[in-house]
Amino acid sequence: MDTRQDLKKAKRLVVKVGSSVICEKDAVSQGRLRALAGQFGQLNRRGYETIIVSSGAVAAGFRKLGLHCRPTTLKLKQVCAAAGQVSLMIAWEKALGAFDLKCAQILLTADDFSDRSRFLNARNTFISLVEMGVVPIVNENDTVAVEELKVGDNDTLGSMVANLTEADLFINLTDLDGLYDSDPRKNKSAKLFLEVPKVDKNVLNLAGTDGGPLGTGGMFTKVRAAGRLADRGLASLIANGHTRDVLIRIMAGEELGTFFKPSKKTRKARKHWLAFAARPKGSIIVDQGAALALVERGKSLLPGGIVDIVGLFDVGDPVSIADRTGTNIGVGLTNYSSPEIKLIKGHTSKYIEKTLGYSHSEEVIHRDNLVIF
Ligand code: GLU
């Protein structure tokens, strides 16, 4: 999916719709859902498999519960999400049903991505649903997720779902036409980017952070999500969900929105999962020599360079790697548990067998199971 023309070859699409797209005056709008559902109906009839990531639970919930504005405390957000999610799904079911589409609800949270077996189970369910022609509708399971354990915004959630389901394209629908060189709400001559070849620091700086009154993420989380997918070799688009037939026109190759090109140098699925979804169970602190070997020379992590560990972890767990100043260098899957590393740290690899009576491998973290930031 290197160019927009390639999009015609796409099969599996993940489309995120923000609150700003589906709500009107703070309430989920049946008319807006219907306009989108008509497009999903057409796409499915043409053989595309579609997955929707829909915000709007909190927005639907606070209206339903008679609150005057979007809640700010976690407790109220969770209450509104619980009350609103059911209304949101009823609205989607009605809208999609009018175009003969069946839908299914999938509520996920960060744990479902960080635990490899839950990740794979979720993937199987998604794939079975789309193969049966059912449209999965995803949202974060706001009711159970405490702030630290949340994915936090549906741009990130959408990109994680696109990765999980190995989609060909992620389309992020919002209330702007795409990424501009300055804020189009403040600057009338702001220029829209039709294509972003690479998401680097400069591009992220352009994105700003303001999410508007209804949504959680701003352009920043959208662009960051696109960058992470590009890194995985997946194409994505940010486009305006209010543009007539936007999805159909994008899939026909029309130049709507901002197209984020997938990177040529991509990370394998497992490394992508390590970098963006795995939740480290602890950290390994390394000396300067080891930090250099990891960052500059692409080496594995050996026991000799380890100065300390933080937390309790087991063999195979994801752990973060930091230098002595606390700077996070990367994340990897450890071959040794924290009690084992306590015994072998600072020593050469030969010492492993002598000390433990066995050796799984010379490296504490092998390069193949390591992502450097
Ligand atoms: N999960 C939230 C909701 O449904 C939305 C999060 C977001 O918009 O990023 O209200």
Image: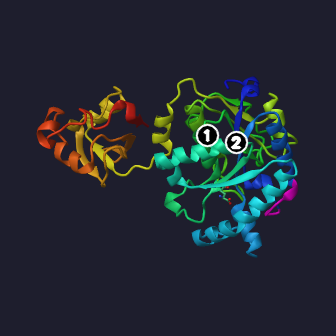
* Count of numbered labels shown in the rendering: 2
Q: Residue at x 67, y 26 (%)?
A: 1
Q: Position of residue 88 (x, y in %)?
A: 75, 61
Q: Which residue is mark 2?
A: 130
The color scheme shown is rainbow
Classify mark 2: helix, strand or loop.
helix
Secondary structure at numbered mark 1: loop
Q: Is residue 20 magenta?
A: no
Placement of 367 over or under 324, stated as above or below: above
Amino acid at pointer 2: Val
Tell me if I can see residue 14 in this picture: no
Ligand 1 contact, mark 2 (Cβ < 8 Å): no
> Which corner quadrant holds the C terminus?
top left
Q: Nearer the viewer, residue 185 or 257?
A: 257
Callout 2 touching callout 1 (CB < 8 Å): yes
* Left/right of residue 244 with respect to residue 176 in the rendered view: right
Residue extending furthest toward the left: 354
Find residue 346 and report its image quarter: top left
Q: Which mark is residue 165?
A: 1
Residue 192 rendering spot, x and y as whole percentages: 75, 35
Could you tell whether 183 is left or right of 157 in the image? Answer: right
Q: Residues within 10 Å of mark 1 (few under 14, many from 20)?
A: many
Question: Which residue corresponds to the image point at 58% horizontal and 68% vertical from the top-left?
Answer: 74
Q: Is residue 27 visible?
A: yes
